[in-house]
Structure formats: structure tokens, C-alpha cells
Amino acid sequence: MTLRMGLLSTAHVHTSGFASRLESMADVEFVGVTDDDVERGREAASRFETSFLDPDGLLSSVDAAVVSSTNTTHRRWVEQAAAAGVDVLCEKPLATTLEDAKAIVDVCSDAGVRLGVCMPLPFSVPAKRAKAAYEAGEIGDLRVAVGTNRAWLRDRHLTGWSADPEAAGGGAAMDHTVHVVNLVRWITGEEVVEVNAEFATMHDGLEVEDVNVLSMELSDGSVFTLDGSWDRPDDWNYWGDATLTLIGTGGELSIDVFDQTLKRTRDGEGIDDVYWGSIPDEGLFLDFVDAVENDRPPLVTGEDGLREAAVVLAAYESDERGGPVAVEYPR
């Protein structure tokens, strides 16, 4: 079976990587792209050496599609795909409001289409090994989880849309919180029940937070802290990180998803890191394609995306109130 897939919007910084995955996958036909910005879409189609179609044309030509749009337009693209009977892999966060996130989950359920979310960290080798160790009871009962998902600010935030509140729905907390929350939920099976968040804006000219620290309580009573800031300096040796340490009554697990790197020294250009390890996005796409072909839910479902969006939105409410906020999960 050949699965026909396409891209709904080319706005996201991950679009090029997604196109590369679709182009290289066996048993997948990369049909093309569409975009509400025609000039941007045509340029991307030319660069990816694929077709540019209008939304109806693309949706009538594919079995599944990847929503790679700005955060605040996810609902519109998913609703169009669901109406056409097309399975969806949606960029994170699932949505920037609980109303939109719930609507996305419901419309896909009502249409009988699969909904996955672009959460690649569970597909990394370090994360898989950590989950196996945790489930084997190697650290005993969980007491503390400490995570980071920090990155350069750099051009993609300064000149792109991810620091535009109208397009992104927020800043670094909207961009990064969901990844490590998803990893904690996947490994431990616990939910975030309360968030106490503090945001700050350190770079001139930003309308959104670039620094955020979340102190959370999990459903088993353990403590979970997360730094998801855009705070890496321009000369930092790598784009950022995704780490998680789980401390239990009998031991500790440390995960560094992107630590599979080599140091490179170049004359006059300093030192940087070159990644050689497994590609989490590859596992994400293989899982979604297999889910469509074998009529099963993807590893990271729309319901997961809904619950993780609820944590993010509780963090924004907490920062605004100046105190802890209970996470409200839609039913």
C-alpha cells in the first residue's frame, strides 16, 4: 500500500524537515503542499520539488496530511482535513485555547479520522531506554522530575512568527512546555494537576516571554519542574536541549535526548556540536504512517495533545495570577 500524504501550510520552521521525511519514506507518496499564503506555498513546493495545490485539491488527493501551520490556525486546517476524511498529524501545541483543542479532538473523532500530534521525544533512543527502566522499577517510586527544553532565540523567533502572539498564541512557554510534559506523561503515566509558573521577557523588542520556569505537582504527589526558555546565547555550541531527570526512592534516571553529538572545532569559527544519533522525527512519522495503515491510534494522540495544551494554558493563567493554578482537563 502506498499512502498519499501532503502538507497543510508551509508556515512552520519544521516544514522542511517534514517534507524531507515524506519524500524519503518508503510506501509514502509526497503529493504536494498547500498554503493560505500562495507565494510562500509555491516557493516551498519549488524547493521541495513537489506540487502546489489549493486546499481542496490537496485534500482530495491525499489519505493523510501534516498540519504545519501557525499555532493559532491549527483548528481551521484540521477541520478542513476531517471534513475531507483525511487523517491528520498536527504540529504542536495542538491549539492555543482549550476550546480549539477540544474542537480539534472532537471533529476528528466525529469524522472517524486519526489524529496524531508532532511530539517526537518518545521516539528517541534515550527516552525509550528510560521508559523501559522506569517501568522495570529501577528507581522505585517517583519523587521528583526535573526537565529542560531550552533553545536559541535567534532568527526564527526574531524574524519568524513564533514570537508573534497573534500567530503563536504565546512565547517560549507555548513553544516548549508540551514536549517535556508529554515525555513525563508517557514515561510515568502521571498527569500534571497543578502549575505555578513565572515568565519574563529578557530580549528587547519581544512581545512574548522568552524565559519561563514551571513548578508543577503530578498526580502521584511528586514535584515536576521545567525550564523551557529561549535563553541559549548566539554562540552556544548547539541549538538547545531536551532533558529529563527522574528521581525516585531507589535511584535516578537521566535523559538527554540530543546528547548524541560530536564536538567540531573550526578555524576561526569556534566549537559547535554535530548530531549523529537517531532522529526522533523519523520514528514519529513511521509511527503515524503505521497507525494509518494498520487502523490504530498513533503513539501520541489528539487526547494527549489536548491534555498537554491544558497544562500550558494553566501556566499562562498562573503567571498572570501570580500563583499556583489547578489544571482543568476538558471532558
Image (cartoon, rainbow, N blue to C red):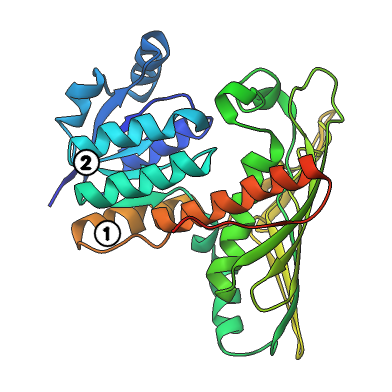
Would you say the residues marked 1 and 2 are in contact, meaning their CB atoms lie under 8 Å apart? Answer: no
| Whether residue 5 is visible | no
Count the marks.
Answer: 2
- Residue 131: x %, y % from top left: 56, 76
Secondary structure type for disc 1:
helix
Q: Quadrant of residue 137?
A: bottom right
Q: Residue furthest top?
A: 39
Judge whether 57 appears above or below 194 on screen: above
In the image, is 317 to the left or to the right of 232? left
| Whether residue 4 is visible | yes
In the image, is 26 to the left or to the right of 16? left
Residue at coordinates 61% horizontally, 82% vertically from top-left? 134
Closest to the observer: 324 or 157? 324
Task: Please state which amino acid type lies under the numbered disc 1.
Answer: Asp
Judge whether 293 appears above or below 251 on screen: above
Task: Please state which amino acid type lies under the numbered disc 2.
Answer: Val
Tell me the crowding category of disc 1: few under 14, some 14 to 19, or many 20 or more residues within 10 angstroms, Cα based: some
Q: CA distance from mark 1 to mark 2?
A: 15 Å
Q: Which mark lies nearer to you, 1 or 2? A: 2
Closest to the observer: 225 or 14? 225
Judge whether 186 appears above or below 8 on screen: below
- Residue 126: x %, y % from top left: 60, 68
Tell which circle, 1 or 2, labels the residue nearer the N-terminal end.
2
Residue at coordinates 35% horizontally, 38% vertically from top-left? 66
Residue at coordinates 53% horizontally, 68% vertically from top-left? 186
In the image, is 292 to the left or to the right of 90? left
Circle 1 residue:
290
Closest to the observer: 237 or 164? 164
Q: Looking at the rendering, in which quadrant would you find the C terminus?
A: bottom left
Circle 2 residue:
86
Tell me the crowding category of disc 2: few under 14, some 14 to 19, or many 20 or more residues within 10 angstroms, Cα based: many
- Residue 36: x %, y % from top left: 37, 16
